[in-house]
Image (tube, helix red, strand yellow):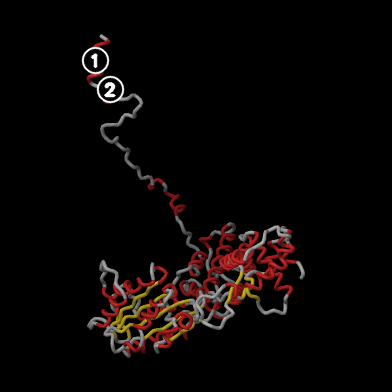
Amino acid sequence: MSKRLSDTALQNPKRKALQPVCTQLATPPTSPNKKSIVDISATLKGHSKKLTLVEDSVYSRAKALFQRGNKDSSHEHLVGRKPEAEKFSSFLRHSIQQRKCSSLYISGAPGTGKTAQINLSLDVLCNFQSNKKVHTIFGARVQVMRVNCMTIAKPENIFNEIYNYITGTSSGRRKSFDDLYTHLTRKNPDVDSVVVVLDEMDCLITKDQQVLFQLFHCASHLKSSVLSTKLVLVGISNALDLTDKFLPRLRSNGFNPESLQFMPYTGEQIKQVVMHKLNSLLDSEKENSSSNQLPIMHPAAIQLCCKKCAAVTGDLRKAFDICFKSIEYVEQSVRETHDMSQLTLETAPKVLISHVAKVCSSTFGYDSLAKIKNLNLLQKAVLCSLFNMDKNHPEAKSFTVNELYDYYCAHTEQIIDNLLGRLKKGEFLEIISALEASSTIILSSTSRSFTMHIDNGNKSVKPDVSYDDMLKSVEDIGVLKKILLSLK
């Protein structure tokens, strides 16, 4: 019997593999029936209010005014930017009505309202109909294209973006400047001019500056008789001297663009903007309000915020951030003692000067300490050496990086007895670059020329954090404190 079984097993060697294994999971022949989903929302009844993500209150409406991206379309210009708006509109009117190519370079520090004002002016001219392909502006048929150059992968891709926009097509082959130029020379009965706004234009900078040169060349008044569709180019950048520094060929060829500079906001201008936004709350509740007093924020608190921002940066966005945080700070404390739904613009506790002072201290003071805290030991040592050099040489107006390195080698390394090791020049320059990237020092060129690449060693250097914050940061680090306080 056993022999017969063994013979059968030899004749069918695979039979055993076909038998079910007891350790395997049994698979059901069909998908199991799933239980139906029961909707319990009807049983929640009074709990539905807890599902509200944003509580509607006078504070939440006030905070919304100071959020990044909030737009005010009730006027043709931003508060404090009427001259810039009029000059931009005058430039467009002259270019479009005269049927000529032209270019405008707009510069200014961050937070001065460059992009916001240009977009608002264009929205007004286009009657806030951004979806239309062709607009009637100053009696002409105009296409308006707005591009943030930070979204362009390669500078030369800008020609393809412009070509696809004005033609309304997206072909497989990437278009070049020649393709764009050829299209503009052809007669187009539907379009007279194309306005192209290039925000963050410095992102198009290349080694030979060919991309920017071709764009401004194409928008030159010299091409007005050549191009059937006139190109009006508007470039926006934070660099004040971009055309002088990176496009020297423009002047030599006689087609230098017009320029418009947005100066940093003054304290009074920032105050006007903040008050305008807060007064808009009164306008929306005019029927229910009997008071003309400024809501939510005390005038003294606004004054402190505006003066502080104007003195430090002149950045309007920073003032908005401080107002937002101050309102939020008061809102959190009021929520504990008041019914938020019952508060009105007249009865809601206001943001006081003490609240703004606390937020300003956090915004401008703590950031400095945090920046120093994030540095490593060698970076802090170099920064301490810079403060020490400045203290021991009060007669000097500025120092170069090379002079700081010599001072560090001659004095700092003797003080610390080589505890931190000797720094080579290349390592020192890397530390300088890291300090600049962390916004703890400021490097500036001492040369009057417009050379594009300047060795960091020849640049002047000065601290971008306060001496008191530096002293506070190294209070418990004996070696660094010795570097900072030592006398020559």
What secondary structure is found at the residue carrying circle 1?
A: helix
Ranked by sequence position, the earlier of labels 1 and 2 is 1
| Callout 1 touching callout 2 (CB < 8 Å) | no
- Of 408 and 18, the residue lying toward us: 408
What's the mark number on residue 353?
A: none
Please indicate whether residue 270 sits to the left or right of residue 16 in the image: right
In depth, the one of 257 and 450 nearer the eye is 450
Residue indicated by mark 1 = 7
Judged by depth in the image, the label closer to the viewer, 1 or 2, is: 1
Q: Amino acid at mark 1?
A: Asp
Q: Amino acid at mark 2?
A: Lys
Residue bearing the label numbered 2: 16
Residue nearest the viewer, comparing 435 with 65: 435
**Residue 384: x %, y % from top left:** 68, 66
Q: In the structure shown, which secondary structural element does the residue marked by tag 2 occupy?
A: helix
Residue plotted at (31% across, 38% down):
34
Label 1, label 2: how many angstroms apart (C-alpha)?
Answer: 14 Å
Quarter holding residue 151: bottom left
Residue 234 on image: x %, y %: 39, 80
- The crowd level at tag 1 (other Cα within 10 Å; few <14, some 14-19, many 20+) is few
Q: Position of residue 467 (x, y in %)?
A: 69, 69
Whether residue 10 sits left or right of residue 58 in the image: it is left
Q: How many marks?
A: 2
User: Is 329 rendered above or below residue 146?
Assistant: above
Q: Position of residue 61 (x, y in %)?
A: 49, 66
Label 2, residues with CA under 10 Å away: few <14, some 14-19, many ≥20: few
Residue 404 in view of the camera: yes
Q: Residue at x 68, y 58 (%)?
A: 420
